[in-house]
Structure formats: structure tokens, C-alpha cells
Image: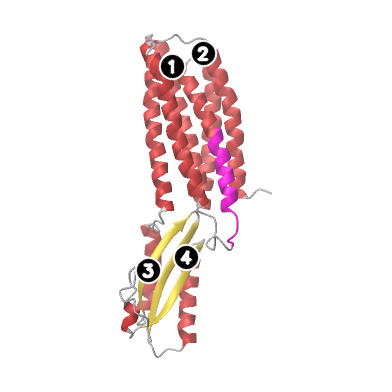
């Protein structure tokens, strides 16, 4: 059985199959290069949606011996591929449209062709809205990238339809391919943004400022009790949040008392930030060695005898 994320990816696949048929039908009826480029992007949508489903299936796998932190980073590969496919689709639009700039051709059977295209756009817009909401709720970068891709397709179609109407009203046949190229440039920018976000995830980017503020608020309650903290590090892996920090307590405390405080802090962070995993390291406040590892690399590498 498919889980929630996978069902949304399947919805995207079904929508892509339907819109491919509608848009290629519109192109065959009108001969518009803009509508052809729009249909070609829907093929890319289908490939991207299939890849998203595959990566979401991998990301669902539980942690194992070789992947102790789980497989959630697989989502970044899907969104990265989605960004590249978006840019590839834009490049194909420009490649196809440029010859029509030099040699414009007339557009035929506009009414039925535009009707099919508008219907396909309505399907894409509705599905994109549903998937974007689900992606934000489930904190899935793959679903959000897929929704961005579908929204890009919607804007492509709107731009193409606008270009066709202007071409028909003005008689300037060159407007059809020029507007297709303008839309393609916008698509390239969207693809770049998705690639950048995927790169941040693969490079273990820290939690956003608002999440770190939540953690700091929790820690501030314990600072008032004389505890100190350092080496706070955070990273995001798909929908998961990972937090590690060192908890410095009076050396006179028993191990049990220190452990209880650490456990309380970990549970408080997990309650405030869903899908988070906090790891604490207990250290004596008075020991100078406890301050040697505030950074990622220890200052003092000599073993303690």
C-alpha cells in the first residue's frame, strides 16, 4: 500500500498523463510552437513525477545497518533531478521556438486547441495546489518541488495562451515563439531555485532560524538553573530534523540526575519540533576539557589518562 506522500506523487503522475494527451491534441490542432513547448514540458512533468514516487519510496525505508539516520535524504535527489528537468524543459522550449522566430508560421483551429489547453491548465493548477499544501504539511521537499514544477507548467500555459491570443489579434506571428522563450527563461529561474534548495539539503544545512529560536527558548529555561550549553549543531534531512548539543552541569551531580535533565531537554525539543531527533552529551561544568570541543574539531586531541 502507498502512504500519504506516495499517493500525492501518484496523483501527479495521473495528472501528467491526462495533460500530455490534452496538450499534444491542442498542438496538433493549432500548429502553435508555444503549445508544442507546453506539451513537451508535460512529458518532463511525467518523468519527474515517476522519479518523485521512486525517491519517496526509498526515503520511507526505516534506518538500517548502513543508514543509521534513515533514507530521508533521498528526497533531495528527487527535487534536484526535478530542478534539472525543469531547466531541460526550458532549454527545449527555447530550442524549438527559435526557428519560429526567424520563420513565423500561422496558427490554425485556435478555438478548440485553446479549449483543450485551458482544460489541461485547470487540472495542473488544481493538482499543484493540492500537492503544495501536502508538501508543506508533510515537510516533503520532493512534493514541494513537484508542485513548483506543476505551477511552472501552469504559468507556461498561461503565457503561451496569452501569446497566441496576442498573435491572433495583432497579426504578428513572431509573438508566439517570443512569448514561449520568455516563459522558458522564467522556468529556468524556477529550476535554479529548486536545485539550490536541494543542494542546501545535501550539504547538511542548519535548521531555519525560527526552528533554532524554538531550541534556544527551551535551553534558556535551563540556563536560569545554572546549566550551560555549547556545540549546538542542527541539520535537516528531508522531513527530519537532527539536533545535537553538549549539556554542562555541575560536576557534583550524579549521572542519573544529569541524565534526567538531558532526557527532559530532548523530549521538550521533540515535542516543540515534530520529526526531530535530539542527541545530548553530558559534561561537567568545571572541567576545562569540556570546553575543548565547542567547535566541530576538538582543540585538545591528547587522550585523558
In this figure, which residue is indicated by the disc labeled 2? 30
Q: Which residues are magenta?
A: 46-64
Q: Which one is earlier in the sequence, the residue at label 4 or at label 1?
A: 1
Mark 3 sits on what residue?
232
Mark 1 surroundings: few (<14), some (14-19) or many (≥20) residues within 10 A: many
- Mark 4 against mark 2, which lies toward the viewer? 2
Could you tell me how many numbered marks the image carries? 4
Q: Earlier in the sequence, mark 2 or mark 1?
A: 2
Image position of 79 (left or right of 220): right
Numbered label attached to residue 255: none
Task: Find disc 4 in the rendering and name its residue.
Answer: 272
Looking at marks 4 and 2 on the same chain, the residue that comes earlier in the sequence is marked by 2
Does residue 25 show up magenta in the picture? no
What number is the disc on residue 164?
1
Mark 2 neighbour density, 10 Å: few (under 14) some (14–19) many (20 or more):
many
Q: Give 16 or 78, whichever is nearer the viewer.
A: 78
- Alpha-carbon neighbours of circle 3 within 10 Å: few (<14), some, or many (≥20)? some
Percent across and percent down for residue 289 are 33, 81
Of the numbered discs 3 and 1, the one sitting upstream in the chain is 1
Amino acid at each position: 500500500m502507498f502512504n500519504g506522500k506516495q499517493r500525492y506523487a501518484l496523483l501527479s503522475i495521473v495528472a501528467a498523463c491526462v495533460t500530455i494527451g490534452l496538450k499534444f491534441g491542442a498542438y496538433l490542432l493549432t500548429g502553435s510552437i508555444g503549445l508544442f513547448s507546453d506539451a513537451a514540458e508535460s512529458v518532463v512533468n511525467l518523468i519527474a513525477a515517476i522519479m518523485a514516487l521512486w525517491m519517496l519510496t526509498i526515503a520511507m525505508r526505516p534506518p538500517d545497518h548502513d543508514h543509521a539516520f534513515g533514507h530521508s535524504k533521498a528526497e533531495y535527489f528527487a527535487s534536484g533531478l526535478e530542478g534539472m528537468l525543469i531547466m531541460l524543459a526550458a532549454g527545449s522550449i527555447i530550442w524549438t521556438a527559435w526557428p519560429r522566430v526567424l520563420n513565423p508560421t500561422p496558427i490554425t483551429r485556435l478555438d478548440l486547441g485553446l479549449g483543450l489547453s485551458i482544460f489541461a491548465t485547470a487540472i495542473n493548477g488544481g493538482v499543484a495546489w493540492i500537492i503544495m499544501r501536502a508538501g508543506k504539511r508533510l515537510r516533503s521537499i520532493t512534493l514541494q518541488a513537484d508542485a513548483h514544477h506543476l505551477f511552472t507548467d501552469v504559468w507556461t500555459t498561461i503565457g503561451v495562451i496569452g501569446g497566441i491570443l496576442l498573435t491572433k489579434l495583432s497579426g504578428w506571428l513572431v509573438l508566439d515563439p517570443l512569448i514561449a522563450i520568455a516563459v522558458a527563461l522564467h522556468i529556468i529561474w524556477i529550476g535554479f531555485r529548486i536545485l539550490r534548495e536541494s543542494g542546501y539539503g545535501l550539504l547538511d544545512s542548519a535548521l531555519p532560524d525560527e526552528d533554532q529560536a524554538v531550541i534556544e527558548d527551551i535551553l534558556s529555561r535551563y540556563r536560569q538553573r545554572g546549566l550551560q550549553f555549547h556545540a549546538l549543531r542542527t541539520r535537516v534531512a528531508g522531513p527530519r530534523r537532527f539536533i545535537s548539543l553538549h549539556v554542562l552541569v555541575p560536576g557534583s551531580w550524579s549521572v542519573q540526575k544529569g541524565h534526567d535533565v538531558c532526557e527532559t531537554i530532548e523530549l521538550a525539543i521533540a515535542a516543540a519540533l515534530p520529526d526531530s531527533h535530539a542527541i545530548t552529551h553530558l559534561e561537567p561544568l568545571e572541567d576545562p576539557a569540556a570546553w575543548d570541543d565547542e567547535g566541530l574539531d576538538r582543540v585538545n586531541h591528547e587522550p585523558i589518562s
